[in-house]
Amino acid sequence: MQIAKALTAAKVPNPSAYKNAHGLSPRSFSSDPYHWNANTVVHILERKEYTGCTVNFKTYTNSIWDKKQRDNPEENWAVFENTHPEIINPEEFEKVQEIRKQRHRRTRTGKSSMFSGLVYCYDCGAKMRYCTTKDFEKRQDHFVCGNYKSNTGSCTIHFIRAVVLEQLVLTNMQIVISYVTAHENYFRRVMTEKMSLKSAEIIKSAKRKLAQKEKRLAELDRLFIKIYEDNVSAKLSDERFAMMSEQYEDEQAALRKDISELEAEIAGQERQSDNLELFIKRARKYEGLNELTPYALRELVKAIYVEKPDKSCGKKKQKIRIQYDLVGFIPINELLQQERQRETA
Ligand SMILES: [Zn+2]
């Protein structure tokens, strides 16, 4: 909606105006050539073809009698890569899909935070809730643990003000960026080692889960044949058959979804050296970052974990841990310490 508003304000011709001007027949006519619908923008953002591939079977029809076009779930699409030049690179496209999935929930006041959906409680893992009111000044906006309900919930408050969070995240990013740009080769060596240990673990567990799901899927196929035969031989009533086959189909659909997610996870882990290079490239892009923008945040950061404030030494101290996009947690304190030791040696 915000993009649509910006395009309208900038008087950028909308797709039907563009088609009109180029002698192509538009799908619909709009009276105002500069008016952009939020839906039009959504279609553009989600159009996988712009990454250079061809996508088939995005819709299906039930039968030759029922010709209504229905949306096919993405795991049933057939995607052919590199069939024409890309206009957006696949990484950027995926980033957009990720951002859209965790879209900012706007509060009733209309205010939203660039951190919404990115902040988690370190102790219970729940998403932290963004709290603001119309009268709040910006410095009063804050996040609290989603499992905290004024002392009746299962977790403690983990209160952190948005401005404090912003400062902590920016500082952490600046340290990481300057370290990566100054010691790229050493950073690459340390992270490669750290990531290959971690990803071997993840791949092993994902492959185990994948095998279980595939086994169950095959079992369901056999069960389905069995009830079909029982139904034909009248051992199973039509009603019961319909009910059971529906159950099996639902379970199969859920399994297929899980399987495709696991396969994507394994493929992602196996691409880890590409991921590391991409992260280094992005860090270099933000060299000298001195203000946190939503885009820089989403390009570099996957999640932020907020610890319980530490009051042990009188003054309240708050710690956060940042899971960086593509590479995960970076042991930045250890790296800096090694650096100091090298300097004094
Ligand atoms: Zn919590």
Image: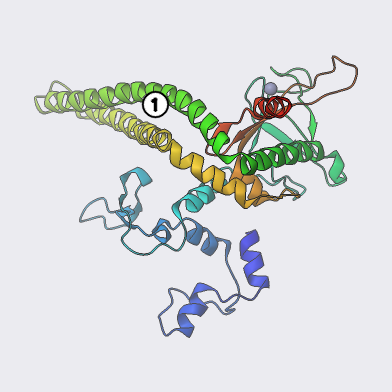
Callout 1, which amino acid?
A: Ile
Residue 273, by quadrant, is top left
Front residue (pair 38, 269) = 269
Q: Residues within 10 Å of mark 1 (few under 14, many from 20)?
A: some
Q: Which color scheme did the rendering employ for the protein?
A: rainbow
In the picture, measured across the screen, residue 165 lies left or right of residue 246, that is right
In this view, which residue lies farthest toward the top?
312
Number of disc labels: 1
Q: Position of residue 16 (x, y in %)?
A: 49, 76
In the picture, measured across the screen, residue 93 lies left or right of residue 208, that is right
In this view, which residue lies farthest toward the left?
233
Q: Residue at x 51, y 32 (%)?
A: 189
* Figure quarter occupied by ligand 1: top right
Q: Is residue 323 visible?
A: yes
Check the picture and name the quadrant holding the N terminus.
bottom right
Residue 260, by quadrant, is top left
Q: Position of residue 133 (x, y in %)?
A: 82, 43
In this view, which residue lies farthest toward the right?
314
Q: Position of residue 228 (x, y in %)?
A: 15, 28
Q: Residue at x 42, y 61 (%)?
A: 50
Position of residue 279 relative to residue 261, above or below, is: below
Check the picture and name the quadrant holding the C terminus.
top right
Position of residue 284 relative to residue 330, above or below, is: below
Front residue (pair 65, 119) = 119
Secondary structure beneath label 1: helix
Q: Is mark 1 within 8 Å of ligand 1?
A: no
Position of residue 16 relative to residue 273, above or below, is: below
Q: Is residue 116 visible?
A: no
Q: Position of residue 8 (x, y in %)?
A: 64, 71
Position of residue 343 relative to residue 109, above or below, is: above
Mark 1 = which residue?
203
